Each structure stands twice: as structure tokens, then as C-alpha cells.
Image: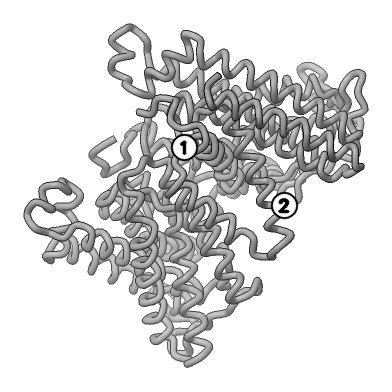
Amino acid sequence: MTRERLINLLILLLMIAVPAWAYAVDEPFILTLTTKVAILALAGVGLNIALGLGGLISFGHAAFFGIGGYAMGILASHAQSYTPMMEWPLLIEGTKSMPVIWLVAMLTSALAALLIGALSLRTSGVYFIMITLAFGQMLYYFAISWPAYGGEDGLSIYVRNGFPGLNTLDPLQYLILCYVVLFIVIFLSSRLAKSAFGLALGGARQNAERVQTVGIAPYRVRLTAFVISGAVTGLAGALYADLNRFVSPTMFSWHTSGEIMVFVILGGVARLFGPVAGAALFIGMEHVLGGISEFWQVFLGLTLLAVVLFARGGLIGTLAGREVAHD
Amino acid sequence: MSAILLVEQILNGLQSGVMLFLMAAGLTLVFGVMGLINLAHGSLYMVGAFAAASIAAATGSFVLALVAALAAAAVAGALIELVVIRRLYARDHLDQVLATFALILILSEGTRWMFGSFPLYLDVPSWLSGPISLPGGIQYPLYRLAIIVAGLAVAGGLFLLISRTRLGIRIRAGEADREMIAALGVDISKLYTMVFALGAALAGLAGALVGAIQSVQVGMGEPVLILAFVVVVIGGIGSIKGAFVGALLVGLTDTLGGVLLPQLFALFLDPSAAATVGASLASMAIYILMAVVLVLRPSGLFGERA
């Protein structure tokens, strides 16, 4: 067993132990906090597919997070007010069913990722970072100025959406639901990384010309990865909106993009459990430091700075050493 | 729409464009010379504005406030470069993004710690307040006109600095081949600190000048930072000329889009729908402009390398 696997196992144990303890001592707040970690980790797992495997530094993943959130908000608000979304050419009604919402969230954010990726991937390096940031901001300002769904104020959903057979308003049941989704996605992403597609993607990151000479078009591989990545982050957005029962343009803001990126880097880029470790560390610091000082972000910033300057490879990279080939 | 209103809006667009240029010039120099992506540039804008507001409150002199803004931002820039930024030149963009994102958190919250959450106010000096009559019977605020003139003057000075002075030659040489100029005996790390401080001073000046029109508050640099990124990318990374053209394009698109687009849609939509669609599109206009430029020219209007 490699050290990274050992650490992953440890993270897994902690992920189960913390909520089990919280449930035993009746601390629903900790359960909700853990749910938040799981959902944000899922967003990070999504970004990690583009960032870690593909080397695509997207500074606009808030776009997909927000689209997922608004997919939930729009569908649920129509179901809440019993008004159909569309009557012509075909009748589309809102829904309060999570599986349907998740599907819509993933499809719409995948579509957005296809459009944004198709344009952005024509560029590379700093230009790619900036153009993805710009697309995120574009949707942010659109969400603010479009009054139909709350505009700047956002949208409140009164009751959490339902999942067949579960009471999603119960913190533990919603946490378990989010965990199951997270673990399925982590499993799929580990399979993806080892698949022929994942190898081609890693190859395109390390040396696009060589990949091209063996007959693989880097552009198409990267675009596919970007779409998958966007869809996963969109799913996380829908779950996050359901956790808060609220969506607002903040989900689209560049701070959100930055934070999702921070989860990935803090945990360790291209590490399977990196986003989980990063999100847990970030939310944990936010919670602990927030209790100590009103100005906790100063300390958060200093910690981040220390990680970048002295602990390269993030938490898992520092603990496990360099096992993943860095180019 | 009357011609007077149009001219006024064009002047407003110019004013925001010129201020964006001051921000974007520093960013594009740092990108071009050091290959560094600096998200904390907006914080230097904020530092300039806060320095100006507190010196103006203490002395009552607007000129001293501007000097303080330049000095504070330049010193802050040089310090940040010495302590943090110079460790990042050899890193990839991902590390640079994260480290400068961390710097934003530190500088923003640190400023909130020192000055509190309430905005400060920086008044337009009496000798620059009030409207001025332009040819054609247009009344335009004198201060905004002064900003345009000041911005253009700084832009001109910067062009001269880059193209005519020894420092400018070194900056351009550093952009072209940093090993070679180091081998020729130029102290490259001192040059980097100077370039960074120069960019910071320009951002601080912009912060102080704009701070007199808007309120001086924590987080004021972030919207401007993102606009400045759009400018740099449209103009082409590393190109001062590109930053100038890009800044004016973005300033004018942003300002005129907000006025013209709703009126354009009013031609074929009912008024309330036109206002909604127009306002939404106007808020997205510069990002659409950027996407169009990048699709047509992936390395910007004046960029050479992709």
C-alpha cells in the first residue's frame, strides 16, 4: 500500500468518524458543515478533472457551479409556485425531485462547458485562465441583471427537494446522500484517470505534440474533459443550492471560482482525495478561525500563502511525497 | 438620444478607459516582463485609495494625497515583491494564482482591520469641482475631465519611459530575453522590483483618482482588477499599446453599452422587456467583446505569443 493510499484511507475514516461523532453527541450543525465539505469537495473533484488531469487552469468553474445551482432554483421555484416553466411548444413543469434536478443541472452545465470550452480552449496559458474567468463573470452579471429569477437577491426555496425513499430535510440523511454521490464520482474519476481517455488527457498536458503524432487530437480530448469537469461541478452546484435552499449570483462570482481552485490546490492537484482534504481543511479553518477572530481571512490568506510557498503539492503532496509524476 | 448626452457618455467611457489603462499597464508589464499573473493588483489600487483618503483627511491637501497614494502603493508593491512575489517567478501559473489570491485575502482583511468596514470619503478638491462648459454647450464635471487629461499624460509619460529611457530599454530587454540581459550585467532582481513597484504606483494613482468619485472601501479593487484583466487579454499580454487600446475599448463598450443597448432593443421589443434584455446584455458586453477578440485573435490585438 502506497503512502497516498494510506492517507486516502485515513481521510475516509475521518469522513465517517466526524459525522458519526456529531450524530452521537447530537450536533446537527457539524453534520451540516460536513455536508458542505462533501459538496464543495465534489465541486473540487469536478475541477480536478480539468485542472489535475488535463492541466487546464480554469478560473471560471463558478459558472458551472452557479448553473447547477440555478437549475435547481428555477425548477424548484416553478414547482413551488405551481407555474409551468414553458407552455409552448411543449409543456415543461418545475419539479421538486432531486434525481431530475441533478440530471438537468448536469446537462445544462455540460452544455455550458461545451460552449465555453470550445471557445476558451483555442487559447492557452494565461489567456485560458483569463477567458474562463471572463465567462464566469459574464454569467455572474447576467444572473444579477436578469430579474425573472430574483436578480441580485437570489431565489429562496422553502422546502428541500425530495429524493425517493429519503427525508432530505434530516441532516444525516442528506449528508449520506451527498456522500454517496461524492464517492461514486470519486470512484468514476479514478477510473477515468486510468482509462485510455485519461492517459490521452495526461499526455496532452505533458506534451501535446507527441499526443498529436500518435493520432489523438488534444483539443477534442481537452474539450471532453472540460465538459465532464463542468458537469460534475454543476451537480455539486445543485446539491449546494439544496443544502442552503437558496441560490444567488454569488455562486457565479469569481471568489467561488477561486475557492474551488483553492480546495484542489490545498489538498493536492491531481490527487484523488485532494479536493476532499482541501475542502475539509478550508471549511475547518473557516469555522475555527472564524470563531477566534473577525478578521480570520487574514490568517486564511497567510496559511494559503505558506502552503504555496513551502508545502508544494498541497496537503496530500506534502504527506505522501511525490508519487504522481509532475511535469 | 441627444448628441449632448452621447458626447457626455463618450467622455465618461474615456474616463473609465483611461483609469483602466493605469491599472492594466502595471498588470501587462508584470505579465510581460516577469511572466507573473498577479491577482493582488487590485489590492494595490485599494491601498492607493486608502492612503489618499487618510492623508487628505489629515492634511486637507489633494496633491499631497495623490503623492501619498503613489508612494504607499509603490512601497507596498516593492515589499510584496521582495517578500512573496519573487519566489513565484519560477512557479507555474497555478501557484501564482493561488498565492496572489491569498495576498488579496490578507490585504483586504488587513485593511478592514486597520480602517474598519465603513467606506472612507475622498473629496474632489475645490479647484477641480463643479462643471466646465465644453464647446457645443456641454456641461461636464471638471474633475472627470481632469482625470482624463491626467490619465492621458501618465500614459504618454509611460510610453516615453518605455521607449526612450535606459530603464525602458532594460524593461523591454527583460521581456525579450531575461538570461541575456542578466549576462550583460543588469541586476535582474532589482529591475523586477522596480517594474513591480512602478505598476503598483500606477494602480495606486488610479485608485486615488477614482476614489474621489466613488467611495473608498475594502474590495473596491476587485471589479476593477477583473476589468483590467479583460483589458490586458484584449490588448495582448505584455503590450502597453495593446493595454491602451484595450482599456479605451472596454471603457467605451461598458459605458456606451449601458446607454445604447436598452434603446436599441426598445426599437423592436416592448419597453420593459427591452430594458431587461438591454441591461443584461450591457452588463455582459465587455466579456462578449473579450470572447470575440480571443476567438478571432487568440493572443489579443497586439500580442505576439500565444
* Identity of the residue drawn at 62% across and 24% down: A231
Residues A300 and B220: in front is A300
Q: Establish if B68 lies above or below B104.
A: below
The amino acid type found where label 2 is placed reads His
Q: Establish if A216 lies above or below A23.
A: above
* Identity of the residue drawn at 84% across and 38% down: A21
Packing grade of label 2 (10 A; few <14, some 14-19, many >=20) is: few
Using residue A167 as the reference point, say whether residue B222 is left or right of it: left
Question: Distance between the Cα atoms at labels 1 and 2?
Answer: 24 Å
Rendered-image quadrant of the C terminus of chain A: top left
Name the residue that disc number 1 marks: A313
* Identity of the residue drawn at 51% across and 64% down: B107
Chain on which label 1 sits? A
Using residue B71 as the reference point, say whether residue B144 is left or right of it: right
Q: Indicate the position of residue B4 as horizontal and vertical percent values.
A: 48, 66
* Identity of the residue drawn at 37% across and 13% down: A217
Q: Indicate the position of residue A171 as horizontal and vertical percent values.
A: 87, 36
Q: Indicate the position of residue B222 as horizontal and vertical percent values.
A: 52, 57
Residues A78 and A62: in front is A62
Using residue B172 as the reference point, say whether residue B153 is left or right of it: right
Residue A142 visible in the snapshot: no
Question: To which quarter of the image does residue A279 belong?
Answer: top right
Residue B281 visible in the snapshot: yes
The amino acid type found where label 1 is placed reads Gly
Q: Indicate the position of residue A99 as horizontal and vertical percent values.
A: 80, 20
Q: Are marks 1 and 2 on the same chain?
A: yes
Q: Secondary structure at mark 1?
A: loop
Name the residue that disc number 2 marks: A287
Q: Establish if A181 lies above or below B257.
A: above
Using residue B107 as the reference point, say whether residue A204 is left or right of it: left
Q: Earlier in the sequence, mark 1 or mark 2?
A: 2
Q: Secondary structure at mark 2?
A: helix
